[in-house]
């Protein structure tokens, strides 16, 4: 019995020592963590962006040991839903990456706070950045700024050019040339099913931008009024643009939407010869060693050059305060720094948002970056109030013409009526 009692006492002593050590260890951990501010950064999942941000966070934390950044990504399709359910409760991110076309929606919902002007002086922003960043300015205050901006260019497969007897170093400069090349680059089976497309027509990719911001202007029109409140593409220029684009599928038979699922899949697989896409695609395509591709300026039409520009911006959520706000400002300043902007171009393919960096000779003269940077000279950034809804009207107009046989005039008038209602709802009372 005494022996059993001694064993029990020893066990209790050992247990007490373990508890003491455990408590001491927790105390030491709290001491180490004391003074460290943790912030959360959100972006949608895009592999090259995720990898670069992970690298950048390590560098930022090394230079700022009192700040810890938690990086979280979400599927593009669920991103806004996740934001809507998290930010108002204060459980979401401190710094958030969002598409510029979503800014009005985020502003209306109260998700963002103005960037502190002592850290982000408006006069410096307007002197250093491309003018399109002003889409992040509301009531005289900036709420979000980009590390990089995007424009469009023509991607083409050099191997497919060679197979078709075309010079791989001479991409089309005009749409007339592009159409003739697309015909030579298209392959179908006996039933008319595409084996290889000459021209990409993925409407929910970048082609709706080509239609609205490039073709409409190349036919002498303007998609919206100068203040962005009124749809103006329901005009002869708009009808000509939609007719011209849908003829690529209905008359010339050089492409169709959803070939091989989407344009990116088809281009990567070597079954799409030419495709209009954004500069952000460079990082992904460069990972495919067997893909020999080139990049060219968007072909002109009727002697007119035009382009579309967009960007993903970083803002600070409205529920971020105190030390988290200070840390968030530091992290955002780091993401907007000259060094990060230059590295973003090389790793992702998106263009530096600051003019002096983007216009460096090594970037402007680069065979792949150059066309996108040159495209910024005549690029327009549509001020969306509901990016998803405003994109859908163009997809619907295309389907009405191609699938339902509706006239381009009726289809575009219907699209304009729907989009005008979207704009009116947003601007009512503003």
Image (cartoon, rainbow, N blue to C red):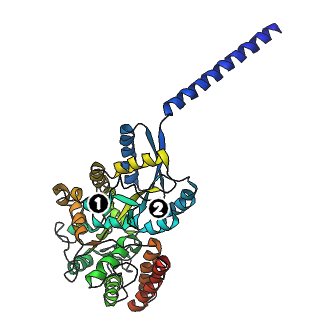
Q: Would you identify the image quadrant in which residue 16 lies?
A: top right
In the rendered view, tell whether residue 368 sits above or below residue 297. Answer: above
Q: Position of residue 86 (x, y in %)?
A: 56, 57
Question: What residue sits 47% from the left and 44% below the top?
Answer: 323
Q: Pinpoint residue 341: horizontal percent, then vertical percent.
A: 29, 53
Give residue 76's mark: 2
In depth, the one of 155 and 61 nearer the eye is 61
Q: Position of residue 411 (x, y in %)?
A: 43, 88
Q: Earlier in the sequence, mark 1 or mark 2?
A: 2
Question: Closer to the camera: disc 1 or disc 2?
Answer: 1
Question: Could you tell me if residue 352 is visible in this image?
Answer: no
Label 1 crowd (10 A; few <14 / some 14-19 / many >=20):
few
Residue lying at the far right in this picture: please name it.
Answer: 1
- Which numbered circle lies on residue 123? 1
Classify residue 25 as left or right of residue 260. right
Q: Residue at x 36, y 73 (%)?
A: 382
Closest to the observer, 205 or 344: 344
């Amino acid at each position: 019995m005494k022996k059993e009692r001694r064993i029990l006492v020893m066990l209790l002593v050992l247990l007490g020592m373990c508890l003491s050590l455990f408590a001491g260890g927790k105390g030491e951990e709290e001491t180490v963590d004391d003074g460290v501010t943790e912030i959360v950064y959100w972006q949608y999942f895009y592999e090259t962006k995720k990898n670069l941000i992970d690298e950048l966070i390590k560098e930022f934390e090394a230079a700022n040991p009192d700040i810890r950044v938690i990086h979280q990504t979400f599927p593009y399709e669920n991103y806004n839903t996740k934001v809507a359910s998290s930010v108002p409760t204060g459980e979401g991110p401190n710094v958030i990456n969002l598409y510029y076309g979503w800014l009005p929606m985020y502003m209306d919902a109260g998700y963002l706070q103005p960037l502190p002007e002592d850290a982000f002086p408006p006069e410096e922003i307007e002197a250093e950045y491309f003018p399109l960043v002003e889409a992040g300015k509301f009531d005289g205050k900036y709420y979000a700024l980009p590390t990089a901006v995007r424009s469009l260019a023509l991607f083409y497969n050099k191997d497919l050019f060679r197979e078709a007897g075309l010079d791989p170093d001479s991409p089309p400069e005009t749409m007339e040339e592009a159409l003739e090349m697309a015909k030579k680059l298209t392959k179908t089976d006996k039933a008319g099913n595409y084996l290889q497309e000459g021209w990409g027509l993925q409407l929910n990719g970048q082609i709706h931008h080509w239609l609205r911001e490039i073709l409409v202007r190349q036919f002498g029109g303007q998609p919206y009024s100068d203040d962005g409140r009124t749809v103006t593409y329901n005009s002869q220029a708009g009808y000509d643009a939609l007719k011209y684009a849908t003829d690529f599928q209905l008359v010339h038979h050089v492409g169709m939407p959803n070939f091989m699922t989407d344009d990116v899949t088809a281009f990567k697989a070597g079954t799409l010869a030419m495709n209009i896409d954004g500069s952000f695609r460079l990082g992904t395509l460069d990972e495919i060693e067997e893909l020999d591709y080139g990049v060219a300026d968007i072909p002109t039409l009727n002697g007119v050059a035009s382009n579309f520009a967009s960007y993903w911006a970083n803002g600070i959520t409205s529920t971020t305060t105190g030390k988290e706000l200070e840390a968030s400002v530091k992290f955002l300043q780091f993401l907007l720094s000259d060094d990060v902007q230059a590295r973003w171009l090389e790793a992702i393919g998106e263009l530096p948002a600051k003019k002096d960096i983007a216009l460096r000779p090594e970037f402007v003269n680069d065979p792949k970056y150059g066309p996108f940077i040159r495209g910024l000279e005549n690029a327009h950034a549509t001020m969306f109030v509901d990016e998803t809804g405003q994109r859908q009207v163009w997809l619907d107009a295309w389907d009405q013409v191609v699938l339902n046989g509706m006239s381009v005039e009726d289809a575009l008038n219907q699209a304009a009526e729907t989009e005008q209602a979207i704009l009116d709802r947003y601007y009512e009372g503003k």
